Amino acid sequence: MSKAQSALILGATGATGKHLLSQLLSSPHFSRVGEYGRKVSSLEGKEGAIKSKLEQKVIDFEKLGESGLKDGKWDVVFITLGTTKAKAGSAAAFERIDREYVVNAAKEAKSDDPAHEQRIVYVSSGGANPSSPFLYPRSKGLTEQALASLGYADTIVFQPGFLKNAERPENRIAETALGYVTGFMSHFSSSVEIGVPLLAKSILNAGRLGSSSLSASVGARTAGKEGALYTIIGNHGATVLGREG
């Protein structure tokens, strides 16, 4: 994938997604960008060249067969879509949005052409574990495994720590309190928090380079099972990768 690439982003209106979308539109490595979601970003103030590079479409995640995701023939699929139990309203609704929507959309975006090698980059969470007794890390871990089983040529998963300076429409008191703790700890370790713009740059770089071209300093590791392997980039690795290129 050394030539100009096309990119699809799901979750572009979220805290990380909006930074990633902006960077994708500014990057010369991506010639075409698709933003698909339940709502799409405002283009107010954007230059004409950027607008012409972007394809936006509102879709219903309950009717993905009508979404047209497959028609885009995307080279890289970026997924920053996610929610919380509190925002979703229930555990069942959380899992439907956080896992089922993500996996089903990724499946729909996969090309039917076996010669078209596609890469998928998913933003999970630090501590993700499919065997966890807790809902949030278990859902993230199960999502990682399900995405890896879809047959993409390259599956990359980010497991960031606390998202520093995340601009959210709602006020999360617990998250604010945690931010003070991770801010202090970040003076001693690069594994606890990451600035959202830096994370977005790292995600873009991973999508552009692919797992086989990541530098050893990123410290990426392989997870999953034969036939469904994927690459994990932790918080420290994301910080390193975000500062490269």
Image: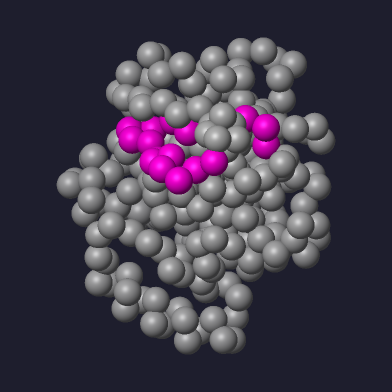
Give me the residue at 54% from left, 61% from top: 197
Return the residue found at the far left: 89
Percent across and percent down for residue 152 are 64, 29
Q: Nearer the viewer, residue 154 or 24?
A: 24
Percent across and percent down for residue 202 are 64, 56
Percent across and percent down for residue 46 are 50, 43
Instruction: Provide the residue span drawn in magenta.
Output: 30-47
Percent across and percent down for residue 227 are 66, 31
Q: Nearer the viewer, residue 230 or 34?
A: 34
Q: What colour scheme has been applied to the protein in the rendered image?
A: one colour
Taking the image as shown, residue 65 lies to the left or right of residue 88, namely right
Q: Nearer the viewer, residue 61 or 135?
A: 61
**Quarter holding the C terminus?**
bottom right
**Quarter holding the N terminus?**
top right
Residue 211 is a magenta residue: no
The answer to whether residue 224 is visible is no
Examine the image and state in which quarter residue 102 appears.
top left
Q: Nearer the viewer, residue 174 or 164?
A: 164
